[in-house]
Amino acid sequence: MKSSLTAGLLGLLFGLGLLLAGMANPAKVSGFLDIAGLWDPSLALVMVGGICAATGLLAWAGHRQRSLLGLPMQLPKPGKPDARLLLGAALFGLGWGLAGICPGPALLGLATGEAAFVPFVLAMLAGMGLYNLLPPPRS
Amino acid sequence: MQLDTLHFTPLASLFGGVLIGLAAGGFALLLGRIMGVSGIVGGLLSRGGQGDRAWRLSFIVGLLAAPLVWQLGWRLPDIQVAAGPVTLVLAGLLVGFGTRLGSGCTSGHGVCGLARGTLRSLIATMTFMLVAVVTVYIMRHALGA
C-alpha cells in the first residue's frame, strides 16, 4: 500500500516534470533531434537537469541494502553491452525519430486527450507484448 | 546548425529535468528500483510478477494524472504531433519492442542509467540518440518530408 502510494506520487512528479520540460510535445522533441535544421537544444538541458538531480540520490540508493521503505534493492548490476541492448536501442531510436514520442510522454499525451497518441500507445503496447513472445535472455 | 531561439526554453527544461531526476532518484531510494517507463509498463504485460502489479499501475495512474493536476494551475503546453496514423503505428511498435529488447528507454537509460554511470546505459543512450537524429535527418532533409 505504502509502495503503491509512493509510486503514484512519483509518477505524478515525473509527469509534471515532463510537462514543464517540454517533453510532452512531440514537435519539440523532433526539434531537438533535428540538429541540421533549426535546432532547439532544450531537451539537452532536460537530461542535464535530470542526471544532476538523480545522481546523488541514486548513489545513496546504491549503497543501501534495503530501500527507505524497507523493500529489497533491485537496481540492475553493471553489465556488458550486448547485441540485444544495441539492437533494441537502435529500433527504439528509429521509432523515437519517426514520431518524436518515447514511452513516458506517450502515456502522458494520452492523458491530455490528444487523439494522435491513441494509435501510438496501442502499437507500443503491442510491440512490448511481441517482445514477450521472444525467448528470455540468457543470464 | 542554427539555434531555434523562438522555441528554446532553457529554464523550464532544466527545472523540468530536475523534477524528472528527483522522481527517478526518489524511486530508487524509496522503492529500490529503476524508474524506467518501458520497464514499468512492460512488466505489466509479461507473465508472472503478480505482486508487482499494484505499484506499476499506481505509477502509471500518477503519470496519467499529471496533465489534470497541471491544469489546476496552468494551461497545458502546446502538443503537436506531425506524424500521420501509419507512421504513429510503426513508430509505436518500434518503440515498444525496441525499449523492451534494449532494457530501457529515455528515462531508464537516459536519466537513471547515465546518472549511475553504467556502460550499458551510456551505449544504449548514445545508440538511440544517434539513430533518432539520423532518422529525423533522413525524413526532413534527405527525403524532404
Image (cartoon, coloured by chain):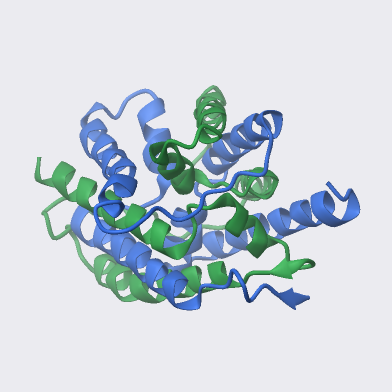
Chain colours: A green, B blue
- Quarter residue B137 falls in: bottom right
Q: Is residue B58 visible?
A: yes
Q: Position of residue A70 (x, y in %)?
A: 11, 54
Write the residue at 31% across / 72% down.
A59
Write the residue at 41% across / 46% down.
B37
- In the displayed structure, A37 sits above or below A89; it is below
Q: Position of residue A126 (x, y in %)?
A: 54, 25
Write the residue at 52% across / 35% down.
A117
- In the displayed structure, B14 sits above or below A109; it is below
- In the displayed structure, B98 sits above or below A47; it is above
- Quarter residue A20 falls in: bottom left
In this rendering, would A102 be left or right of B45?
right
Work out which residue is located at the far front of the displayed protein and give it: B75
Q: Position of residue B100 (x, y in %)?
A: 52, 39
Viewer-nearest residue: B84 or B40: B84
In this rendering, would B86 be left or right of B106?
right
Q: Quadrant of the N terminus of chain A?
A: top left
Q: Is residue A51 visible?
A: no
Work out which residue is located at the far right of the displayed protein and give it: B142
Q: Position of residue B8 (x, y in %)?
A: 57, 73
In this rendering, would A5 be left or right of A91?
left
Write the residue at 83% across / 52% down.
B138
- In the displayed structure, A137 sits above or below B50; it is below
Q: How many marks?
A: 0
Viewer-nearest residue: A103 or A70: A103
Viewer-nearest residue: B115 or B15: B15
